[in-house]
Image: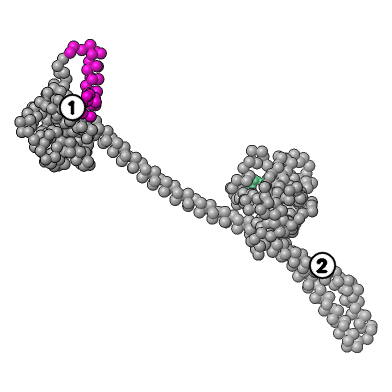
Amino acid sequence: MSSGQVPPTQTDQLMDRLSEGARARGDRPRSNPEIEDEGPIAEATILAIDDNPTNLKVVFEFLRDRGFKVLIASSGESGIERAQKARPDLILLDVMMPGIDGFTTCARLKADPLTQDIPIIFMTALADVDSRVRGLTVGGVDYITKPVERDDALARINIHLQLRQEMKARMAAQAALTELAAGLEEQVQERTRALSESLAQLQQAQVQLIHAEKMSSLGQLVAGVAHEINNPVNFIHGNLTIAQEYVEGLMELVDLAMGGAIATDIEKVATELDFEFVREDLAKILRSMETGTQRIRDIVLSLRNFSRLDESHLKAVDLHEGLDSTLTILNARLKGRGNRLAIEVVRRYGELPPVECYAGPLNQVFMNLLANAIDALDEGPPPSWTGPELDWQPRIEVRTEALAGDRVRVSVTDNGAGIAPEQQSKIFEAFFTTKEIGKGTGLGLSISWDIVVHRHGGQMHCRSELGQGTTFMIDLPVRQGTAS
Ligand SMILES: Nc1ncnc2c1ncn2[C@@H]1O[C@H](COP(=O)(O)OP(=O)(O)OP(=O)(O)O)[C@@H](O)[C@H]1O
Ligand SMILES: [Mg+2]
């Protein structure tokens, strides 16, 4: 830019606005008395850099008389040094100097973080439009003309000092805010850390609680199975003593016969023994002992079948086997108790193809659904039942059917009290339980959902009506990888 109009500076604009305001208020024109009377801003320090001693003297005296603290330098290099040490609030900078000129000095001051914020006003000759423009482009904020026109210079200096003060105040506020934010951030982090710790402790406690509860329900289950086994064992044990007595008597007879005893003696002993009865009864006892051992074998087989510990991989299995094993394990809980009759179990098994699944986890699902049904029936008849409590027949129906599209359905229905509509949406959530502490963890259905839906690509539904009972349905693909 060689000539033409100098772009308006911030100062020009501010001064324009000041005078516009005055015109609008109808103030009589004055020789800018506010500016003339204004003292130095907060004892500001001004550094004047000029190689011309006469100029420097004029500026020095003029500013000192106005109450500023004035520093001087006669070259760009010494000016930079002074600025770095004294950090003045404003710099008046001559353009034409031997050594580095004003523009270079300005550029260096602006490049140094120590001095870059100090406003620089160039001092240029009135006619030197090019220098003014260049001064503004290298980082100067304004210019004043030489010879210095005092009112104009003072006004510009004051405005830039004011702007700098405001800037400093803003930066201080910003720094304070940043510090505050950092403090807050730290507090938030501290709180978050404390909360995470409590959460971890809570989760740990919860895990222990669940473990304890699961162990206690497992304990109940084991106790039930032990009871189931104990019945035939006691029965066999009791009958063994009788069988032993019978056999001893019979051996006595055999000994007599072998020893050549006479018939009347043998007959006498046989009558004492009640030989005919013993012969029949021994056969009966042996048969029932066989039934007892068969029952024990069934239970042991069911336990093996249920746990399927040896099958952690996918395998096509007969779901009915899993259902039967689970029912056998739960047998003790199905028996009559208190005011409740024995639970009638109705098996409506359809024709099912072998289903490819993780048999162990799936048996757990059957166990959860059947245990929930028994829990519901343990609560007694639904409120709609008007007869004597003992006349009410609790019932569980286990149904299986093949569905279209290579899918199968297993349903477990009970005729218990049902689930309230507002609870039906929550029953699959982890830890949702309506059972008393120590009886339910609220995990059975959420674990079952996970096994059916996520591990097998199946679906799980519940249909329940208050007072009518509940049905849980599990739909499974016959083959894995074909789930829609
Ligand atoms: N057959 C049912 N009849 C009535 N309510 C049921 C039935 N099945 C489930 N529920 C309701 O759903 C809730 C959640 O069942 P879920 O099996 O997930 O947990 P839980 O049985 O309470 O505890 P657990 O973890 O020991 O199984 C039960 O507390 C009960 O309110
Ligand atoms: Mg349950």
Residue 119: in magenta span: no
Q: Residue at x 18, y 36 (%)?
A: 103
State the CA–CA distance, disc 1 to disc 2.
Answer: 125 Å
Task: Compare residues 238 and 456 and report the one nearer the observer.
Answer: 456
- Rendered position, 41 above or below 239: above
Q: Residue at x 24, y 16 (%)?
A: 20
Residue 13: in magenta span: yes
Element type where label 2 sits in the image: helix
Mark 2 neighbour class, 10 Å CA radius: few under 14, some 14 to 19, many 20 or more: some
> Which residue type does callout 2 highlight?
Ser
| Residue sticking out furthest to the right | 264
- Residue at label 1? 129
> Which residue type does callout 1 highlight?
Val
Q: Residue at x 82, y 79 (%)?
A: 248
- The reply to whether residue 103 is in sight is yes
- The reply to whether residue 66 is in sight is no
Give the side of residue 325 with respect to residue 142, left or right: right
Task: Compare residues 425 and 174 and report the one nearer the observer.
Answer: 174
Element type where label 1 sits in the image: helix
**Label 2 CB less than 8 angstroms from ligand 1:** no
- Residue at label 2? 288
Give the side of residue 410 with respect to residue 105, left or right: right
What residue range appears in magenta? 1-29
